[in-house]
Amino acid sequence: MRRTLLFATACLLAGAALAVPVSPLRAQAAPPHAWLFGSWTGGLFPAAQGLPAKVCLAQPVVIFTRDVVLRATLTDPSYIQRVIETARTNPGSTEFRFAPATASGGGLLGMNAGPAPTGFGCGDPNVLHVQRKGDNEITFPGCTDFPYPLIRCR
């Protein structure tokens, strides 16, 4: 028992994943927005088709995960993080409702240059509509910060 515990601790410290069987009761279904998971480029500017993955992943514009959506801006080197409260998917689209943004201190070099943009340039900063245009292309309809389609980084 002790040897197994030491091995498991060593694996966790090393960042390795242990293969632990998951019971059907504990298994979670994929969230409705799982089709969006990953990094996307474009939106702020027209995306070049056929970008190499290395170039695309160097600085994606939007990153979708299970719990948050990260977005880049032209004026801040760090990503703005929006926590997902709900995600509802219909055929060809997904609607996100975000937790209200909190004021963040900081900014570049810890200086606060005023309130950071928290939305995506849409009517409501706490709602984002994503429309699927193809397997690897999406748009944010009605969002002025993202006038161009986004393509998935691969």
Image: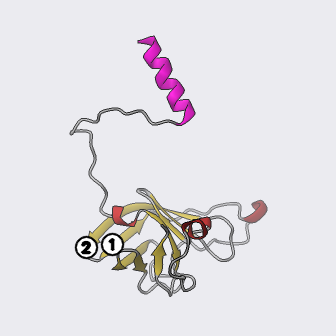
Residue 103, x across and y down, in percent = 61, 63
Location of residue 74 with respect to 31 vertically, above or below: below
Quadrant into which the N terminus falls: top left
Furthest residue toward top: 2
Of the pair 33 and 135, the residue shown nearer to us: 135
Residue 35, image x, y percentages = 34, 65
Tag 2 secondary structure: strand
Q: Amino acid at mark 1?
A: Thr
Looking at the rendered structure, the secondary structure element under dot 1 is: strand
Residue 111 seen from this side: no
Queried whether the magenta region covers residue 13, the answer comes back as: yes
Question: Residue 33: in sight, yes or no?
Answer: yes
- Taken as a whole, is the magenta stretch helix, strand or loop? helix
Return the residue at label 1. 94
Q: Amino acid at mark 2?
A: Asn
- Left/right of residue 89 with respect to residue 145 in the rendered view: left
Tag of residue 143: none
Pointers 2 and 1 in contact (C-beta within 8 Å):
yes
Tell me the CA gap for discs 2 and 1.
6 Å
Indicate left or right for 149 with 105 as reference.
Answer: left
Which residue is farthest left?
A: 24
Q: Position of residue 7 (x, y in %)?
A: 48, 21
Q: Which residue is mark 2?
A: 90
Image: magenta residue range:
1-15
Q: Mark 2: few, some, or many residues within 10 Å (few <14, many ≥20)?
A: few
Q: Tell me where residue 46 sits by quadrant.
A: bottom right
Depth check, front residue: 143 or 101: 143
Can you say whether 3 is above or below 128 in the image?
A: above
Q: Can residue 114 be found in the magenta stretch?
A: no
Give percent across and percent down for residue 86.
35, 63
Above or below, comparing residue 81 to residue 119 in the picture: above
